[in-house]
Amino acid sequence: MRLLIINPNTSAHVTRALGEHIAPMLGQGWQLDCVTARFGAAYIASEAAYAIAAHAVLDAWSSQGGSYDAILIGCFGDPGLEALRELAGCPVIGLAEAAMQEAAKAGRFAIVTGGARWAPILQRRAAAAGLQDQLAGLLVLSESGAELLADPARALTRLEGAARQVRSESGAESVIIGGAALAGMGEALARRLPFAVIDNVSAAARAIRTAASRPAPAGPDGAGYHGLSPELLARLQA
């Protein structure tokens, strides 16, 4: 089984962290190919960076060649998710969608993540998944995930306080800790808090294990593309 992990930002250390967290969860029988965006933001922190990341996801996928049994978009916000699903011909998993779908099984959920401009992006992602009514609360810390990761001990304290606050205010059954750079921190908090906490990267790994459908690519759309990489252009015209 082959899994392609695409990090839509240009921070290679986040790519490594994703692979290191997911590989043991999938176990033997999986080959992981991890790729970092060739262009874009070091950390996605705005609508503009998010839009660029969606292009970077398609570019990264097309540059790999070959076929995969599943693809993971390693960003809590899932840029390019629908577009890649249209093209890839295999299950495409997003960190945010996977975590929200898992949390929604237990009822209403809240989210804690880093990056001041992420709230509307995540609200749209919940709506796209049909889960807007189950999103009970959203607490966005001013620090980005990368800034939180620079001091893991302080990050855990900040995230714990935020999780307690958003659950108290929202009455949610569970709290998602979102952010590719924060892989594993949700699990650490789950051992410290008296309510359900979902680590977004771990939820995505579980979704990969159970993904079974292999949708057929949509095929060419007849659009006249200009200025794209030859690899992406070939995929769009296949």
Image (cartoon, grey):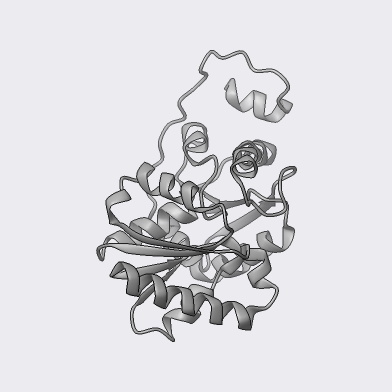
Q: Residue at x 34, y 70 (%)?
A: 169
Say whether residue 122 is visible.
Answer: yes
Say whether residue 172 is visible.
Answer: no
Q: Nearer the viewer, residue 86 or 187?
A: 187
Quadrant of residue 183 within the rendered picture: bottom right
Quadrant of residue 184 within the rendered picture: bottom right
Q: Nearer the viewer, residue 160 or 14?
A: 160
Q: Residue at x 60, y 43 (%)?
A: 50
> Does 170 sit left or right of 37 as displayed?
left
Q: Quadrant of the C terminus?
A: top right
x then y, percent, for residue 195: 33, 79
Q: Is residue 65 above or below residue 33?
A: above
x then y, percent, for residue 65: 65, 38
> Does 150 sit left or right of 30 as displayed?
right
Q: Residue at x 64, y 79 (%)?
A: 152
x then y, percent, for residue 25: 50, 69
Q: Nearer the viewer, residue 5 or 14?
A: 14
> Does 169 sit left or right of 192 as displayed?
left
Total label count? 0
x then y, percent, for residue 151: 68, 78
Q: Residue at x 42, y 44 (%)?
A: 124
Q: Is residue 92 above or below residue 140?
A: above
> Does 190 sit left or right of 183 as displayed?
left
Q: Nearer the viewer, residue 32 or 102?
A: 102
Q: Is residue 4 above or below residue 16?
A: above
